[in-house]
Amino acid sequence: MRNDSVVCGFLGQGCDGETMSSRTTVAVTGGNGQVGRGVLRELADHGYRTVNLSRSSRREDVADGYRRTDLLDAGEVYGSLAACDADAVVHLGMVPNPEGSPGHVTFESNVMTTYHVLEACQHLDVDSVAVASSMSALGAGYDPDPVRLDYLPVDEEHPSDPRDPYALGKRVLEVTAEGVGRRNDGPTVSTLRFPIVVDDEWISETLVDSDRSLDTIREAPYYHSVRNTLFAYVHLADLAALFRRCLETDFEGHETFWAAAPDTTVDLPTADLVAAEYPDVDVRVETGGFDGHESLVDTTKARELLGWEAERSWRD
């Protein structure tokens, strides 16, 4: 870790000697986490000055600045964003999954941290905010019941059916973001829905070097979860690039975007996968059906509005 990271981050000067005004500053909440570290690296690689806002001790060495911040405390959020003079914010600092916390704690983390960040951003004239939602907002992921689908592949227009505390919190934060985005003086707000986030090591160990036949997956303890999340995944580098694109693209109000790799985690062709796992779900594909291992998540909106496409597949 650079010894001068905190000092140079808050004295109006970048660590390379540039003045603060010459670089766009992005505050990343939850920068200690897996996705946070990936986003910080992506932003740094593209010339942004970054500040990590996290409630625990610093666990990364990428950000130009760090501020210990309890995101459930509105005053601390406001103070930290004001101190780092952020032009944009990526909000990731929430409970990453519901497995280690009571339901009310998980729900509060998703909803109230987002509310505090968005309110502070409006009053501090922050231009753009990108917020981590989840595939769970669809009603998938951690719910013990099977996911309810109207059609495949799912897109941003597909109805949401959240039931468990984690999914409910993610959907409520999307509604909150939509409301703030409608304000005349509010920031541009993006909410990103994504499945399991992986890196090269995880891909090698879990996908490339294992049996990805549907029969084997059906026998695994994680089968319900991967079926509920449509056998989808996204590489960390692709997801980090999407967060950056959200901050760079000029649109009005609030938009939700799906993120996913271009294929599934199964060896079986997608048409056969749908027939086996979702036989009663309507398939909406312009060509009349799937002809390869295409993802069951449609990311057309991110491509058309943000110029983003996932570039990494485990099959490569």
Image (cartoon, rainbow, N blue to C red):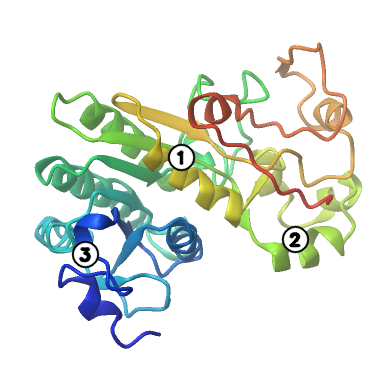
Residue nearer the viewer, 185 or 10: 10
User: For residue 283, which quarter of the picture?
Assistant: top right
Q: Residue at x 40, y 85 (%)?
A: 1
Residue at which label 3 appears: 19
Q: Earlier in the sequence, mark 3 or mark 1?
A: 3
Name the element at disc 2: helix
Could you give the CA–CA distance between mark 2 and mark 1, rounded to whole angstroms? 22 Å
Looking at the picture, how far across and down is residue 62, in whole percent? Answer: 42, 72
Of badges 3 and 1, the one in the foreground is 3
x and y, in percent, of residue 20 in the image: 21, 62
- Sequence order check, earlier mark of 2 and 1: 1
Residue 90 percent coordinates (x, y): 35, 51
Q: Is residue 108 above or below residue 171?
A: below
Q: Amino acid at mark 1?
A: Leu
Q: Which residue is mark 2?
A: 203
124 is higher (above) or lower (below) than 28: above
In percent of the image, x 39 and y 59: which residue is there?
Answer: 95
- Does dot 1 land on a helix, a strand or a loop? strand
- The kind of residue on which mark 3 rests is Thr
Residue, disc 1: 192
Callout 3 touching callout 1 (CB < 8 Å): no
Q: Are marks 2 and 1 in contact (CB under 8 Å)?
A: no
In the rendered view, does 75 fall on the left or right side of 273? left
Report the residue at 67% width, 25% height from top: 153
2 vs 3, front mark: 3
Q: Position of residue 118 (x, y in %)?
A: 21, 43
Crowd tier of the residue under label 2, counting other residues whose Cα lies within 10 Å: few below 14, some 14–19, many 20 or above: some
Seen from the viewer's position, the closer of residues 178 and 302 is 302
